[in-house]
Image (cartoon, rainbow, N blue to C red):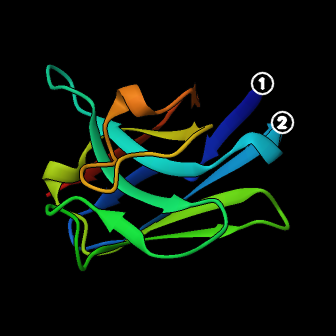
Amino acid sequence: QVQLVESGGGSVQAGGSLRLSCAASGATYDIYYMGWFRQAPGKEREGVAGIYAGGGSATYADSVKGRFTISGDNAKNTVSLQMNSLNTEDTAMYYCAASRGPVPFISPLRPPHFDFWGQGTQVTVSS
């Protein structure tokens, strides 16, 4: 089993920045791919960004490209999401997730591809 704990959420004004972190523990050797998802009230959970545990290219949702950056630190078993130029549409609960196996090259950020989930951290952006 893998445990994921998110931190770094909070409230910020539009145009501001936040950095989310996800700490993984347990069977971290099992992690193949990690992602960040978000879910706003009344909406489906959507993938935001993803990265391979061993490094490599990252994947981003179109809505966050150029504003968000995902990065991983294998030594610390953490994955971070730097969020810049935030707007009110970024308001949501943000979740860290990990996959034990390969994810599809096309559209990897689909919830069913992920095996472990954190409890989430709230991000609120005000205008």
- Expressed as whole percent of the image width and height from the top left, the position of residue 62 reads 15, 63
Residues packed near mark 1 inside 10 Å, few (<14), some (14 to 19) or many (20 plus)? few
Q: How far apart are marks 2 and 1 (CA)?
A: 6 Å
- Quarter of the picture holding the C terminus: bottom left
| Circle number at residue 70 | none
- Expressed as whole percent of the image width and height from the top left, the position of residue 23 reads 72, 48
Q: Quadrant of residue 12 in the image?
A: bottom left
- Expressed as whole percent of the image width and height from the top left, the position of residue 10 reads 46, 49
Circle 1 — which element? loop
Choose between 16 and 82: the one closer to the eye.
Answer: 82
Residue at 71%, 58% in the rendered image: 78
Residue at 32%, 72% in the rendered image: 16
Q: Can residue 9 be seen in the rendering of this structure?
A: no
Choose between 47 and 108: the one closer to the eye.
Answer: 108
Q: In this view, does 41 lie to the left or right of 114?
A: left
Residues packed near mark 2 inside 10 Å, few (<14), some (14 to 19) or many (20 plus)? few
Circle 2 sits on which residue?
Answer: 27
Circle 1 sits on which residue?
Answer: 1
- Quarter of the picture holding the N terminus: top right
Most extreme residue toward the top, as rendered? 42
Against 18, residue 91 (above or below) is above
Disc 2 and disc 1 in contact, CB within 8 angstroms:
yes
Choose between 107 and 88: the one closer to the eye.
Answer: 107
Against 18, residue 47 (above or below) is above
Q: Which amino acid does label 1 sit on?
A: Gln
Against 104, residue 86 (above or below) is below
Circle 2 — which element? loop
Residue at 61%, 72% in the rendered image: 55
Q: Is residue 34 left or right of residue 78?
A: left
Q: Which amino acid does label 2 sit on?
A: Ala
Q: In this view, does 41 lie to the left or right of 47?
A: left
Q: Can residue 52 be seen in the rendering of this structure?
A: yes
